[in-house]
Amino acid sequence: MSNMEWAESQLAEVELLTSMFPGQDELELTDQLALADLRSYVETSSSGDKPPPSRPRFFIKQRLDSSVMNGTEFILSCAYPSEYPSVLPEITVRCSALNRAQQTEIQTDLNKYLMGNCLGELCVLAAVEWVKENLEHFIKKSFSASQAPKLESASQPQQEVFSRLWIYSHHIYNKSKRKNILEWSKELGLSGFSMPGKPGIVCVEGPQSACEEFWSRVKVLTWKKIMIRHREDINLNRQGEDSKSVESIDSLRKFTGFEEAMFDPHGNRGNHMDLGQLYQFLNEKGCCDVFQIYFGIEGR
């Protein structure tokens, strides 16, 4: 498909969704300018013109009123990559009735369904219908898990663990993903940095539970390739001679806050970073050893 064909398909789907979900309590377009740019491109441009840089983002909100669901609401957060529908859109499911494990599971299953049945086609409505049909199953599992008897903890207090995750992605271009990474790290109280472009690098550090929650959200987005390349886990309840904990979460952090780091972007799309500057950045933070883990060479 061409840029114009992708744009025409996206605009047609947005207009269909707008007609099917006319109220703002059902469909909320969060970037009206992107929609206006897309419509202008489709209606006034020739096939050789440069497409708009951003695409529509929106939320679809649905309430299920069966006896079991009892008015349960779910939200689909949707964003179009420029090549959609040749690639899948970014669709994230949120439902307060699900526990964290079930939230991850339903997201994974939805992505598998879309990849196996909808790749190359408009699929937002298919995603809505799939969630409607399957949400009850996941909520029942979540409820059963919450009702399971909890074993009494042993006399030993639960150990607190500090974690630092070094995440590698084939690339990070998508503005929606970049925004999620920044917002989720802040929400979870994590420090570190993300480097967009090709390759994409993300480091998060903080309480292990918060790092694992961040990873569970990020990994279920649509990626060409993403993995935890390296991780560091440190138990905090180790006792010193004075019977006090040797470390605290904040004392182990190597970053202050979380930032998106850019290192002299270059290349045709401005998507390659200066790895020498990245190495210097890591060296200043006392993390230069991870450079070789990422790239297989020693930095200088």
Image (cartoon, rainbow, N blue to C red):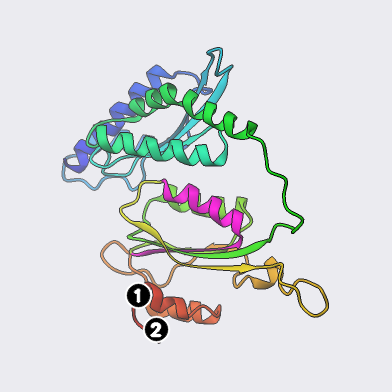
Locate residue 10, reporting x and y percent: 29, 33
The numbered mark at residue 299 is: 2
Locate residue 40, reporting x and y percent: 30, 35
Q: Nearer the viewer, residue 161 or 18?
A: 161
Mark 1 surroundings: few (<14), some (14-19) or many (≥20) residues within 10 A: few
> For the point 31% across and 35% down, which residue is it?
114
Q: Nearer the viewer, residue 300 or 47?
A: 300
Residue 228 vertical position relative to residue 242 in the rendered view, above or below: above
Give how far apart the Cα atoms at labels 2 and 1 are.
Answer: 9 Å
Give yes or no for residue 219 being in the magenta stretch: yes
Give yes or no for residue 247 being in the magenta stretch: no
Residue 130 vertical position relative to residue 149 in the rendered view, above or below: above
Mark 2 surroundings: few (<14), some (14-19) or many (≥20) residues within 10 A: some
Secondary structure of the residue carrying numbered label 2: loop
Locate residue 121, reporting x and y percent: 24, 32
Secondary structure of the residue carrying numbered label 1: helix
> For the point 56% across and 22% down, which residue is it?
72
Q: Nearer the viewer, residue 126 or 241?
A: 241
Q: Quadrant of residue 204?
A: bottom right
The numbered mark at residue 226 is: none
The residue where tag 1 is placed is: 295
Work out which residue is located at the far bottom of the displayed protein and give it. Answer: 300
> What amino acid type should be assigned to the residue bearing mark 2?
Gly
Q: Quadrant of residue 54?
A: top left
Q: Quadrant of residue 207?
A: bottom right
Work out which residue is located at the far top of the displayed protein and give it. Answer: 67
> For the point 38% across and 23% down, which residue is it?
129
Range covered by the magenta-colored residues: 199-220
Q: Are the two marked residues, 2 and 1, in contact with CB atoms closer than 8 angstroms?
A: yes
> What amino acid type should be assigned to the residue bearing mark 1?
Phe
Q: Nearer the viewer, residue 43 or 61?
A: 61
Q: Is residue 264 left or right of residue 235?
A: left
